[in-house]
Amino acid sequence: MATTSEDFILVGKISGVFGVKGWMKVFSFTDPRKNILAYTPLYISRNGQWVEIKVSGGRVQGKGVVIGLDDIDDPDKVLPLIGSELAIKQSQLKPSTGNDFYWSELIGLAVVNLNDEALGVVDSLLETGKHDILVVKNKEQKTEQLIPFVMEEVIQLIDLDNKIIRVDWELDY
């Protein structure tokens, strides 16, 4: 069954062939990477549509993840799938609670400081050793700011309903 991409969240990408039984290497966007194996069903991007796929098995392999699909038993059938994105439906995620948020919930939110000055919109997030970083882009001023995602110190409020993040951060940092 194919559906549109509106309510889907990317969780990985097929990066290569693994073994002789038609398994595939997957670059997982989940944290930790093995969490991609917990989602069922998975969806694959085919011709601009999301198509449900049935995973027959999977495991952590070295630093990556490998999966097998029910209807693929030959490495040659994997080749055309390399580069295809994998996703889940938004409804498959457990609701976030307290000060825990999914990155997908934060992307696109407006960022304002304590003086109500607009800093831009969350474009992406970066993972660092100590804490995550909001990448905030202001298209009008053609600027990009990296803001530490430190709750109650830098991040003062995340309002998902009003699509806004309030930060203790200045325009010229």
Image (spheres, rainbow, N blue to C red):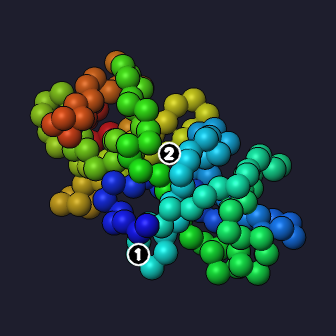
Q: Which comes before the other along the chain, label 2 or label 1?
A: 1
Q: Residue 5, how many percent across, how many down?
A: 36, 63
Q: Mark 2 packing: few (<14 Cα in 10 Å), some, or many (20+)?
A: some
On screen, residue 47 above or below 15: below
Amino acid at circle 2 = Leu
Instruction: Label 1: state its secondary structure.
Output: loop
Write the residue at 68% across / 62% down: 69
Mark 2 vs mark 1: in front: 1
Q: Residue 15, how many percent across, how many down?
A: 68, 67
Q: Mark 1 packing: few (<14 Cα in 10 Å), some, or many (20+)?
A: few
In the displayed image of the protein, which residue is found farthest to the right?
A: 20
Residue 146 located left or right of residue 28? left
Kindly indicate the quadrant of the structure image that contains residue 162.
top left
Provide the residue designation for mark 2: 126
Q: Residue 14, how many percent across, how many down?
A: 64, 65
Looking at the rendering, in which quadrant would you find the C terminus? top left
Write the residue at 34% across / 41% down: 105
Write the residue at 76% across / 47% down: 59
Which numbered circle lies on residue 155?
none
Amino acid at circle 1 = Gly
